[in-house]
């Protein structure tokens, strides 16, 4: 008989989850993901942590790989502002800004384009983690100021009070939103909000969301002999299994299943038809095995078909789209995923290695592929909005001129001036390859743009065809329900 295997460590959040599941029953994967990432005390993004994102952390994102990424998104913002007819005042915003590196690089570029920079009326950071808000404030050189200050006050007194102590940021929330902050290097007001709908509405805005949507909670569904059922997370007390939690299937239809069948009947049918027509049916059934009968009978082939849906990503896309349509401006989403819904892409990441998503709750980054088709369909009803993409990150960055920027940096035009060592030049070239090579981030990562009606021509860097609103007619009836 084999000896008793060690389970993955039971974290403090794992203990809380165990207790609550034992009391109220299994929870949805979305609730599990939400608690793991956003629990106020133990959530992955909520803890005092500057080290999770970046080379020494659990995962590296494009802005952390190379300054070129943020610089080219900065150039995109400048060119987009021109296509919007150079509005006299506009706002830059980012949702889910992590360590603030992308916005910092965008604002550095902005300073090289005086008319654009002079029109910058403010910066909004949409961030739910108080711990990361403070990291971002530090990255941007944001200092506390009196709420009634005008831009000229701040220019006169550029050594305004400091960033604010940690406790003040931790108290966070409403209290902190009442505080005004000033970004010293970019000379404009900067504010933090929990939700994009709280941003000031007086001017058009150019909004970025980079690797945000993949961190929003997903639901998973599986087709069974009794119809669609939701996958849930239950405690796993079997001493022989590797984790303290396991996936199970709900016995009865849960509210999300009922909603899914009402709102997305065609997507469900498409998934089942594809499974019935494929040579060996579904990829996976609940216990992870395939049965011989499933291979022959089309009805049986459907069993185990799974579908992943991220309602919060669809909602967030709608909020951004509604804002762009109402106040003008544009938005750019960069994330990994496909231009279609998928079955099961939920993954855990720790120290740059894939781990089981149910291991060590709160200590593991959880994410899932973004369904770009779902996003396009979710905003199809928004008046006057045009949607471009998704196009691959590699093609986007090439269209924005990353090769020329790489050459300029290799020629010594970077922040540190000339004189790159051979090793630095090699690292720079490696980071370029990582961003654009289709085998690395170039194909899997994709870019989707929303532009307001006042925007001239296609979104900057995108081919001329708009896939937006009226272009996506096939599923609009489904999308409008979401
Ligand atoms: N854009 C950054 C960070 C990606 S990690 C980068 O590319 O490096 C995801 C970020 O989104 C974190 O800052 C996290 O705290 C934030 N976040 C997660 N859910 C959010 C939500 N609902 N609204 C705003 N920010 C959110």
Image: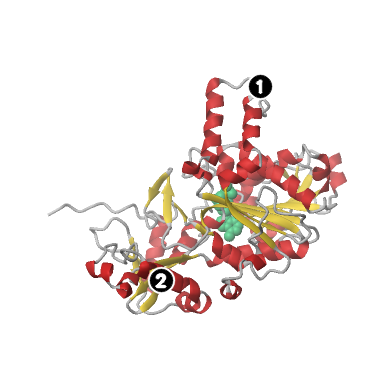
Above or below — where is 121 with respect to 40? above
> As drawn, which residue projects farthest toward the left?
1
The Cα atoms of the two marked residues, 2 and 1, are separated by 59 Å
Residue 185: x, y in percent? Answer: 75, 39
Q: Which mark is residue 418?
A: 1
Residue nearest the viewer, comparing 463 with 74:
463
Residue nearest the viewer, comparing 145 with 225:
225
Image quarter (top left, top right, bottom left or bottom right) of the C terminus? bottom right
Q: Is residue 30 visible?
A: yes
| Closer mark to the observer between disc 2 and disc 1 | 2
Above or below — where is 119 with respect to 451? above
Ligand 1 neighbours mark 1 (CB distance < 8 Å): no
Residue 234: x, y in percent? Answer: 35, 67
- Residue shown at 76% from the left, 62% from the top: 453
Q: Which mark is residue 238?
A: none
Q: Is residue 26 visible?
A: no
Q: Earlier in the sequence, mark 2 or mark 1?
A: 2
Is the Cβ of the residue at disc 2 closer than 8 Å to that at disc 1? no
Q: Decide: few, some or many residues near mark 1? Use Cα within 10 Å; few <14, some 14-19, many ≥20.
A: few
Q: Is residue 452 left or right of residue 469?
A: right
- Residue shown at 61% from the left, 63% from the top: 316
What kind of element bears circle 1?
loop
Q: Decide: few, some or many residues near mark 2? Use Cα within 10 Å; few <14, some 14-19, many ≥20.
A: some
Q: Which mark is residue 273?
A: 2
What kind of element bears circle 2?
helix
Residue 427: x, y in percent? Answer: 53, 29
Image quarter (top left, top right, bottom left or bottom right) of the N terminus? bottom left
Residue nearest the viewer, comparing 267 with 242:
267
- Residue shown at 51% from the left, 74% from the top: 264
């Amino acid at each position: 008989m084999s000896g008793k295997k060690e389970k993955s460590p039971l974290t403090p959040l794992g203990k809380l989850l165990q207790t609550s599941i034992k009391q109220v029953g299994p929870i949805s994967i979305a609730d599990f993901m939400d608690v793991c990432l956003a629990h106020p005390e133990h959530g992955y993004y909520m803890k005092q942590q500057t080290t999770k994102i970046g080379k020494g952390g659990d995962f590296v994102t494009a802005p952390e790989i190379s300054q070129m990424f943020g610089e080219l998104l900065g150039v995109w913002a400048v060119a987009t502002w021109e296509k919007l007819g150079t509005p006299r005042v506009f706002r830059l915003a980012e949702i889910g800004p992590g360590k603030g590196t992308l916005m910092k690089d965008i604002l550095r570029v902005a300073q090289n384009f005086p008319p654009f920079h002079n029109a910058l009326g403010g910066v909004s950071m949409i961030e739910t983690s108080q711990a990361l808000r403070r990291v971002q404030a530090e990255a941007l050189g944001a200092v506390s100021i009196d709420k009634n200050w005008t831009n000229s006050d701040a220019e006169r007194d550029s050594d305004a009070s400091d960033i604010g102590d940690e406790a003040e940021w931790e108290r966070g929330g409403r209290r902190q939103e009442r505080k005004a902050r000033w970004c010293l290097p970019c000379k404009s007001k900067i504010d933090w909000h929990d939700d994009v709908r709280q941003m000031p509405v007086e001017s058009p805005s150019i909004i970025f969301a980079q690797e945000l949507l993949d961190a929003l909670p997903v639901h998973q569904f599986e087709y069974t002999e009794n119809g669609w059922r939701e996958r849930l997370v239950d405690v796993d007390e079997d001493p022989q299994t590797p984790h303290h939690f396991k996936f199970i299937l709900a016995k009865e239809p849960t509210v999300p299943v009922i909603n899914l069948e009402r709102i997305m009947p065609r997507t469900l049918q498409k998934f089942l038809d594809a499974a019935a027509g494929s040579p060996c049916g579904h990829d996976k059934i609940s216990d992870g095995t395939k049965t011989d009968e499933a291979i022959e009978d089309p009805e049986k082939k459907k069993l185990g078909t799974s579908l992943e849906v991220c309602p919060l990503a669809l909602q967030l896309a709608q909020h951004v789209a509604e804002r762009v349509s109402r106040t003008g401006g544009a938005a750019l989403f960069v994330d990994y995923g496909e231009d279609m819904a998928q079955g099961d892409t939920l993954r855990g990441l720790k120290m740059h290695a894939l781990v089981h998503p149910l291991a060590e709750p709160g200590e593991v980054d959880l994410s899932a592929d973004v369904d770009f088709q779902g996003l396009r369909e979710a905003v199809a009803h928004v008046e006057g909005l045009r949607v471009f993409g998704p196009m691959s990150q590699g093609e986007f960055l090439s269209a924005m001129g990353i090769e020329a920027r790489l050459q300029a940096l290799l020629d010594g035009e970077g922040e540190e001036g000339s004189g790159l060592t051979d090793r630095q030049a090699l690292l720079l070239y490696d980071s370029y390859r990582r961003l654009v090579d289709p085998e690395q981030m170039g194909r899997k990562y994709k870019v989707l743009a929303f532009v307001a009606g006042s925007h001239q021509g296609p979104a900057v860097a995108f081919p001329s065809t708009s896939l937006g609103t009226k272009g996506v007619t096939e599923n609009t009836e489904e999308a409008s329900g979401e």
